[in-house]
Amino acid sequence: MRIAQKKILPVAELKKVLGSLRGVGKRVVFTNGCFDLLHVGHVRYLEKARALGDLLVVGLNSDSSVRGLKGEGRPVVPETERAEVLSALECVEFVTIFSGPTPAELIQELLPDVLAKGGDWPPDQIVGRDTVEAGGGEVVSLEFEEGKSTSGIIESIRKIP
């Protein structure tokens, strides 16, 4: 088993691990997304999110969830491979895959200390905001990397003759 794969956990196991880490004072940051065709905008965003606490947990949309959000033809990369790539990043401590259209249930389960989302999400529309704030946590909207997107990469590839 690759070391990175040990960082990919089902939610029940992740919840136990986070409980232990919180017990020694660790501040848990959570973010989520599709992360299809990982690019520099994603990496910069994840590094900024990680800087908000002691460890970063990424909720990864499942393949069916991505299809529901992005349409047919997506994701380009299967969920197991997207999870492995994310978990190989130094700034990411754990990855868990969720199937719903939003991470609301996952956020309720994990109750992170910090919920981070990209600046393309208006603060009042960040899913899980109420849950995290009610639990005493904070919600942070991080600067969006203009011109860096998976959709843009796919469009560029399609234009290649």
Image (cartoon, helix red, strand yellow):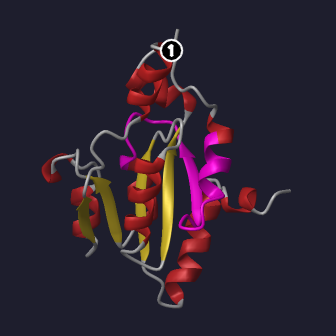
User: What residue sits 42% from the left and 17% below the top?
Assistant: 71
Residue 42 lies left or right of residue 85; in this view the side is left
Q: Which residue position holds label 1?
A: 160
Secondary structure of the residue carrying tag 1 is loop
Q: Nearer the viewer, residue 61 or 88?
A: 88
- Residue 6 quadrant: bottom right
User: What residue sits 38% from the left and 28% below the top?
Assistant: 152
Percent position of residue 129, x then y: 24, 57
Percent position of residue 122, x then y: 16, 48
Percent position of residue 86, x then y: 59, 52
Quadrant of the image containing the N terminus: bottom right
Q: Is residue 51 visible?
A: yes
Residue 50 lies left or right of residue 125; in this view the side is right
User: What residue sits 59% from the left and 62% below the top?
Assistant: 94
* 19 lies above or below 153: below
Percent position of residue 76, x then y: 57, 26
Q: Nearer the viewer, residue 78 or 16?
A: 78
* 52 lies above or below 36: below
Is 101 included in the stretch rendered in magenta? Answer: yes
Mark 1 burial class by Cα count in 10 Å: few <14, some 14-19, many 20+: few
Q: Nearer the viewer, residue 153 or 50?
A: 153
* Total labels drawn: 1
Q: Amino acid at mark 1?
A: Ile
In the rendered structure, which segment of residues is drawn in magenta?
A: 82-104
Residue 71 lies left or right of residue 118; in this view the side is right
Q: Is residue 111 visible?
A: no
* 161 lies above or below 2: above
Q: Nearer the viewer, residue 153 or 18?
A: 153
User: What residue sits 27% from the left and 50% below the top?
Assistant: 144
Name the residue furthest top.
Answer: 161
